[in-house]
Amino acid sequence: MFTECWWDSIFIDLILSNIPGMIIARLLINAFGWEDFDWYGRLGKKNILHWDIWHNHKRLFAVTLVLFCYVMQFFGCFFPGNTMVLNVTSHLTTTRLLIWSTMGYLAYKELYIYASEPVNKKNSIAQPEYIWIPLFATFLEQFIVIRWSEHRYFKGSEPLPMWLVSIWIVVVILIVGRISYLKIRHERDVASGKIVLIDH
């Protein structure tokens, strides 16, 4: 059964790993002048209600997909290797890391281009060339865990409380519903002439 201490999540994961990692990443971006991705469309907006993510179906979809891949990739750091009983020095582990650090970044950039394009752009320059690789890797890793783990991680564990399951169901419904509504509204505005599509 896979378990984790509360102090491990707070002190080791959050305080000693995640927060320092974010601070160092921000310092490196500023020091080298690297591109700063504005995933939520905050630049030039008055407040959070005006962020582009709440009004652009492409941006909301892209951010949702990125967060989903982040979570699945995080699971992939632990479960598939343990399922196949791999040593931390295994070449397969190194290969996986290389795939995620290269193809993952290309897919990340590809999604950002797609999300940042104006909603009235007729032909997107962002073609789905790289996003399929990390998506395939994500589902392959989860398939390996489901198929060959023999319930070693969750055997004997208590089922998720119904209130937690209900929250996630509501969140998924809200996100899918919002993306669908924005997409339908966009198509309606294009059909009515309220939004005029441009080639570039």
Image (tube, grey):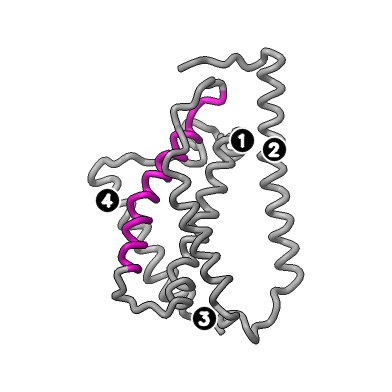
The reply to whether callout 3 and callout 4 are in contact (CB within 8 Å) is no
Left-right relation of 35 to 191: left
Mark 2 to mark 1 CA distance (whole Å): 7 Å
Q: Which mark is residue 4?
A: 3
Front disc: 4 or 2: 2
Q: Quick one: 153 or 137, which is closer to the camera? A: 137
The residue that disc 4 covers is 28
Looking at marks 2 and 1 on the same chain, the residue that comes earlier in the sequence is marked by 1
Q: Is residue 106 magenta?
A: yes
Q: Secondary structure at mark 2?
A: helix
What residue is drawn where x is 71% and y is 22%?
188
Q: Which mark is residue 180?
A: 2
Looking at marks 4 and 2 on the same chain, the residue that comes earlier in the sequence is marked by 4
Q: How far across and down, in percent of the image, does residue 15 sit? A: 41, 70
Q: How far across and down, in percent of the image, does residue 134 sit? A: 45, 52
Q: How far across and down, in percent of the image, does residue 68 sit? A: 55, 54
Inspect the image, locate mark 2, and give the three-letter code of the amino acid beneath it.
Ser
The residue that disc 1 covers is 57
What residue is drawn where x is 57% and y is 71%?
147
